[in-house]
Image: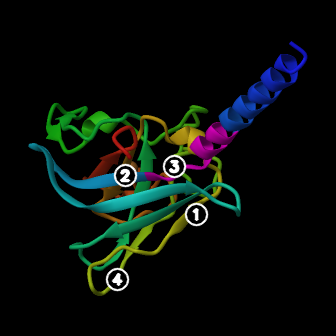
Amino acid sequence: MRLATPLTGIAAALLLATTAQAQTNDADAALEVNMHEVTAEGVQDAMGTVTIESSEFGGVMLTPSITGLEPGVYGFHLHQNSSCEPAENDDGEMTAAQSAGGHYDPEGTDTHQGPYGDGHLGDLPVLTVNEDGEANLPVLAPRLSMDDMTDRALIIHEGGDTYEDEPHLGGGGARMLCGTTSAAS
Ligand SMILES: [Cu+2]
């Protein structure tokens, strides 16, 4: 009986330590989001991935690994809902990845100001596609945390992004690629 108490105490301490370790790892775990081409007909071919992880510089780092795109700069956002399915827009037209909803905006700012403004929290830095049609440069979103990533969609638009409300939502236009964070490994 004299030995039983200390041993139980050690076992409990080890269990607590193990649990704390597991929680720390979960919070730091990277999310790998599978990005698919999206059209008004539905979710199409896989085009690559975006890996999301918390950054030592604050915020989250998003690292694309996508090929087969036209060179240029593309609007990139975290959208509200975890779906890439088409749905009707306000004009009743079936629209690519419309089920993802609008830009993630938990504060209800209703304004598009890009990653360094005070608007939608889901406004990310633009993605750059190089001359070989590859997106591989990481971007840092300083206002977001990994907690914001649960059950949302990452969307890459056909156009760029002015980080302003004009043209509408930065001018990105149609939704071109989409991936849900809930399906991430
Ligand atoms: Cu968007």
Q: Nearer the viewer, mark 3 or mark 2?
A: 2
Which three-letter amino acid code belongs to the residue tagged 3? Answer: His
- For disc 2, the marked residue is 33
The type of residue carrying mark 4 is Asn
Determine contact: label 2, label 4, CB under 8 Å: no
Q: Position of residue 92 (x, y in %)?
A: 16, 31
Q: Is residue 30 magenta?
A: yes
**Lower sequence index among marks 3 and 1:** 3
Q: What number is the disc on residue 130?
A: 4
Q: Nearer the viewer, mark 3 or mark 4?
A: 4
Residue identified by numbered label 3: 112
Point 40% across, 74% down: residue: 136
- Taking the view exactly as shown, the residue that stands out farthest to the top is 1
Q: CA distance from mark 3 to mark 1?
A: 17 Å
Q: How many marks?
A: 4
The secondary structure that dominates the magenta segment is helix
Residue that carries the numbered disc 1 in the rendered image: 140
Q: Amino acid at mark 2?
A: Val
Instruction: Work out which quarter of the rendered image holds the N terminus and state it.
Output: top right
Instruction: State the SS at label 1.
Output: strand
The stretch of residues the image draws in magenta is: 21-31
**What amino acid is at disc 1?**
Leu
Vertical position of residue 171 compared to residue 89: above or below = below
